[in-house]
Amino acid sequence: MSDQGTASPDASDTSAPETPPWLAATIEDAQASDFEAPIAGSRAADAQELSDLFKAAANPDQTATPTASAVRIYNMLAAVAGIHFSPENRDEPFGPMAVLADGRRSPIPEDFRGNPQQVLSNLAEHSSNPVLRARLSDVSWLLDRRQTGLGVAAISSYIEIIRKLDNRQLEFRYNEEIDILGHDVEEYLRRSLQIGRAIGWNKPEVATARELAANIRQRAINSRSLVPTHRFSDLDLDFEISNPTEVATGIETLLNGDTIEGDFHIVVDLWRLASRGYRIAKREGDAHRCKIRAAEQLVLASERMQHSAMLASHHLSEAIAELHGIPGQKDRRTELRHRLVDLQARIPEEMSAFSHEMDLQELLDSIQKEIENLGLLDKLFAFASIAKSPKPESLVNEAIESIRKHPLSSLFSTTHHDREGKVIHRTEGGLSLGEPNDPAVQNKISQNESIRRNIVAAEIRAARHTIVRQHYLSEDFFRGLLQHSPFIPQDVLATFARGFTRFFRGDFVSAIYILTPLLENSFRHVLRSHGHDVTKFDDATQTQQDRTISSLFEQMRPELNAIFSPAIVTDIENVFLKKPRPYLRHALSHGLLHDGDPYGPDSIYACWLIIRLSLLPLLPYRDEFKLPDNFT
């Protein structure tokens, strides 16, 4: 079966995959063509614009007919120049410009290993355009770091680009004005210094790059431009170019000037950067002073945001965090915490509920019809089988697919508030979809699971109502049934029976408070029955203690997966143990559940999950149970 959107080769075709057109060029092609003809006279300062010129040359209109060798070279140069440049990622400064859903992507440097790399090196040696020469030299050196000369050529080319930008000989396509203080210049310098670290910090070309970086930093300060000052001061500190005290003092002098225009966020970041510089210089007093200034800027921002308690409390909590660990600030932190509590009390007033109605009546009617004519045991086993715990990999794949369809929903970080407005959890944003543990993916899983539990909880209510409408369930009945369950320790059998009885009679408050604490003991019981040690030994006191459920999930996850399955273990974790929600074990243990919470879908689902774990092991032996006539 072929992936959608890709050609399906003939079954009899056993030939190797066709070489992409941008890898077909040879050394002979390079020597036979004027490879820089398409960019002659170009004043472009970025490689992407050169890539577009090479693409146009490789696919000309009818008025131009380049040779086949020239087309191959143009395709290669268009591909190399079009690679995404991201020097902020030191370990992977070049990446694909585009990645499609089916796994296809645009070129990356690794594609050019082997013979194509030799062609790139040859072209780099003969290139006169500094932007093209920088890209070719950099990619070639990245693929073979033994070629120090190419690294030197890349640094020299980046420096030449910056100087020609300053002299207005080059320009960026979308910039109306030449800006030597722009982020593109910082990227060229950062990449030059990264290469310099690898090939030799004291080489003349590297020394020139360091001097240029320090000079541009000073130009940014002299221009009183906040963002460029942060940009190039950060670069200076990252590579230890100047004395860190000089960098920090320059920032502080700028911020203490008469007229400072700019968003308060950049002002705060500059005070933090100044603190970092002083800290590197081991001037802790100055570092603390700058941290205090950053905190006070956040306090001022909070005061300006009084129209929104949520925003004001966010900035105030940042200010408190900024003052953490600074001597002499205890009273100020206390004052700000009191102010924060007052602000957070207003947050619930700003929160508005929104809902999306779903008509589940047809589904609930079908559940009632399926179980109403069954015997009691069959009803209970059907009740325990209403839903299945989703597989972990399915949760991740669905979350990633949801983020891809709606990227803005996960692009920004998220704060989770309790009823009093306190921030109880923070989820980082982003679109890095490569790891299941990415915060954005985990947050989306939490959201998706909340929706699923709402639907399942409605089914549970419908099934419970059908059962209790036709049968009277007592604690004696459940004790007789549950004594056979391997999930339930015999010494708490009566307690489990009471929890089950309370649930089926609709006393969900009693049910959730009885059953949730028993879950931990049952996990230890099952692990012991499978021969596992569930205690931990304290070497200092020479005592043993039973592991908590959190410790079991952290230290004995493979054993739990083998017994219960990864799907059930993950489901238990998402409901009882994992932030941001519902985090039921913590909420219940610390008295954080409100009166209505036990009647909510999360609590209903949690009780059902424990009932499911207790009853499902009995299903293969249902014919062996003999119930009194009044229970059938």
Image (spheres, rainbow, N blue to C red):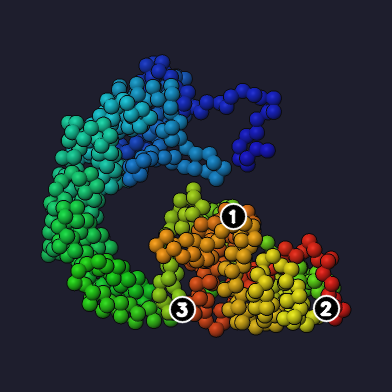
Residue appearing at x 65%, y 74% in the figure: 491
Quarter residue 323 falls in: bottom left
Establish if 227 lies above or below 131: below
Residue appearing at x 59%, y 55% in the figure: 559
Label 3: state its secondary structure: loop
Q: CA distance from mark 1 to mark 3?
A: 37 Å
Residue placed under numbered mark 2 in the picture: 631
Residue placed under numbered mark 1 in the picture: 559
Q: CA distance from mark 2 to mark 1?
A: 37 Å
Q: In the image, is 34 to the left or to the right of 593?
A: left
Please provide percent x and percent y for residue 389. Answer: 64, 61
Task: Indicate the quadrant containing the N terminus: top left, top right, bottom left or bottom right.
Answer: top right
Label 1: state its secondary structure: helix
Residue appearing at x 40%, y 37% in the figure: 83
Kind of residue sitting beneath label 1: Glu
Label 2: state its secondary structure: helix
Q: Is residue 405 visible?
A: no
Q: In the image, is 420 to the left or to the right of 612?
A: left
